[in-house]
Image (cartoon, helix red, strand yellow):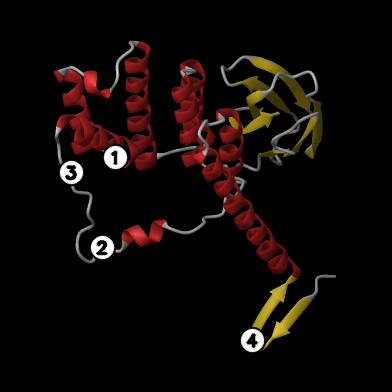
Amino acid sequence: MRSIFHCGQDKVTYKTILLQEMARYNGSKTLAAYDLIRSNLNDSVTDYQYLRIWLDNLNNMNADIQIVSTYVSEGDFASAQSLLDLIQGLYELEGGAMNDYYDYKSFTEMQIMWQQQGRNILQLDSTEVATLVDYADNTNGKAAVAAQGILEFAYGYEYCNCLPVGDSSVWKSYGIVPVTQSYESGLFVEAKPNPAKTWVAFDYKLPVYVSEATLQITNIMGKAIVAFTLKTKQGQKVWDTRKIEKGMYIYTIKTGSVSKSGKLIIE
């Protein structure tokens, strides 16, 4: 029987209390992850693997973009490119968000090309500088900000990113936005614990109109590691990871044309 507490005109259910506790837990976990990330970045030597683990715990696109940057910093361009290719599908980007992401992706691929050629931002030719100007003047989001930063630092350009008087939209972007699983299609999958060491359990739920799905795990390069056939509407599949190489993996549950993906760290 569901109990309801009455306080004046307010009604508080057990579900409400549970959701509040989960929100507090997720908020505390996020703050702890940020503290550990800052501590790592302030060390004299950055441990990129450790940094990626805690960035992945944030479970959002901005953190994944920072993970791409760690791969680029290490010169692991293949892993950076693989994660770049996955992000749009992982977060089901559409419309303006997808356009902004593709601008960022193209910009990052350009940076990777410079590094592969042994060049830095002070060694760009006139065509490349013009490309940066185009990003800075005609795009939004991270690509525009990064291009403006390079142009200001290396080529004497000046940009003002001040808000128009009375524009309070920036304040709306601050604060913790809870990360939720997508249930729109009725397809759900979650890995735990994550990061994993000796085993990981995949909790899943299938849409009402299907009776079978495939759960596949690939490495960051897209190479298939293992696949499982799921034949119940809802359940859990446990994977023994003791012999699996440490690193980041992608798990995908798919049935027909519908799929959901997530990231898994194995320590």
Which residue in the protein does label 1 denote? 145
Residue 155 placement (x, y as % from top left): 16, 30
- Give amino acid for label 1: Val
Residue 173 pos. (x, y %):
40, 56
Residue 61 position in % (x across, y down): 49, 39
Q: Are marks 3 and 4 in contact (CB under 8 Å)?
A: no
Q: Which residue is mark 2?
A: 167
Q: Is residue 79 above or below residue 14?
A: above
x 41%, y 39%: residue = 94
Q: Earlier in the sequence, mark 1 or mark 2?
A: 1
Residue 13's place in the image compared with 142, above or below, is below
Q: CA distance from mark 1 to mark 2?
A: 19 Å
| Residue 99 seen anywhere in this rendered image of the structure | yes
Name of the residue lying farthest toward the bottom: 8
Q: Which residue is mark 3?
A: 159
Q: CA distance from mark 1 to mark 4?
A: 48 Å
Please name the amino acid that badge 3 sits on.
Tyr
What residue does disc 4 label? 9
At a point 50% along the width and 38% down the height, the residue shown is: 41
The tag on residue 90 is: none
